[in-house]
Image (cartoon, rainbow, N blue to C red):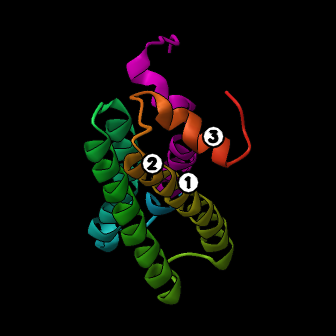
């Protein structure tokens, strides 16, 4: 696919969006192998992880800080739903310990990144220092990475 750039697609540079995309890819590889009778369970898990990167992108594309934060909190909620599902899938031997550990490590990193981004943006909200494009700078700076 050609790389097309504009301000509305800047979310793709966000570390949290990249981590969320990686988590989605891993989730699909694990859950598409579920037995037929667990198809609905697998579909729900994939959908909850799919919601994470989509809400990060939507939040980035919003120019209102309040709406941006709302989308990021929805992403964090979807991630929490996914973590809960994975824990139960592991307990019921539907996931191997190795895949569960790999998945959980990536989800944990993403969860912490989202929390840092939300905290940073909330701080800007209270200080009045919000610029519509500052989300990328905030998260990547919090992780020590530059553009």
Between 27 and 71, the residue placed more toward the observer is 71
Query: Residue beneath label 1, please?
Result: 26
Where does the image place residue 19, in percent across and percent down from the top left? 57, 48
Q: Position of residue 15 (x, y in %)?
A: 59, 42
* Residue at the spot 50% in from the left edge and 15% down from the top edge: 1
Q: Earlier in the sequence, mark 1 or mark 2?
A: 1
Q: Are marks 1 and 3 in contact (CB under 8 Å)?
A: no
Q: Which residues are magenta?
A: 1-29
Q: Residue at x 40, y 56 (%)?
A: 49
Tell me if I can see residue 15 in this picture: no
- Residue at mark 1 to residue at mark 3: CA–CA distance: 23 Å
Residue 76 in percent (x, y) is at 40, 61
When the figure is inspected, residue 7 is found, relative to residue 61, above or below; the finding is above
Residue 121 is labelled as 2
| Eye-nearest disc, 1 or 2 | 2
Residue found 45% across the figure and 48% down from its top: 121
Contact flag, marks 3 and 2 (Cβ < 8 Å): no
In this rendering, position of residue 38 left or right of residue 115: left
Residue 126 at x, y percent in the picture: 39, 52
Pointer 1: residues within 10 angstroms few (<14), some, or many (20+)?
some
Front one among 107 and 34: 107
Q: Quick check: is 10 in the magenta stretch? A: yes
Residue pointed to by mark 3: 140
Q: Secondary structure at mark 2?
A: helix
Q: CA distance from mark 3 to mark 2?
A: 12 Å
Task: Say whether residue 51 is left or right of residue 136.
Answer: left
In terms of secondary structure, what is the magenta stretch mainly?
helix
The mark that comes first in sequence, 1 or 3, is: 1
Image quarter hosting the C terminus = top right
Q: Residue at x 62, y 60 (%)?
A: 109
Above/below status of 16 relative to 74: above
């Amino acid at each position: 696919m050609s790389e097309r750039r504009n301000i509305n697609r800047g979310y793709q540079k966000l570390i949290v969006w990249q981590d969320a995309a990686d988590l989605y890819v891993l989730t699909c590889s694990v859950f598409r192998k579920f037995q037929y009778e667990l198809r609905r369970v697998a579909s729900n898990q994939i959908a909850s992880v799919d919601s994470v990167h989509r809400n990060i992108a939507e939040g980035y594309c919003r120019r209102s800080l309040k709406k941006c934060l709302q989308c990021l909190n929805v992403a964090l909620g979807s991630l929490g739903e996914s973590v809960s599902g994975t824990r139960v899938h592991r307990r019921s031997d539907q996931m191997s310990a190795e895949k569960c550990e790999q998945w959980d490590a990536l989800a944990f990193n993403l969860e912490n990144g989202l929390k840092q981004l939300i905290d940073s943006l909330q701080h800007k909200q209270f200080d009045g220092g919000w610029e519509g494009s500052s989300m990328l700078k905030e998260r990547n700076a919090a992780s020590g990475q530059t553009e």
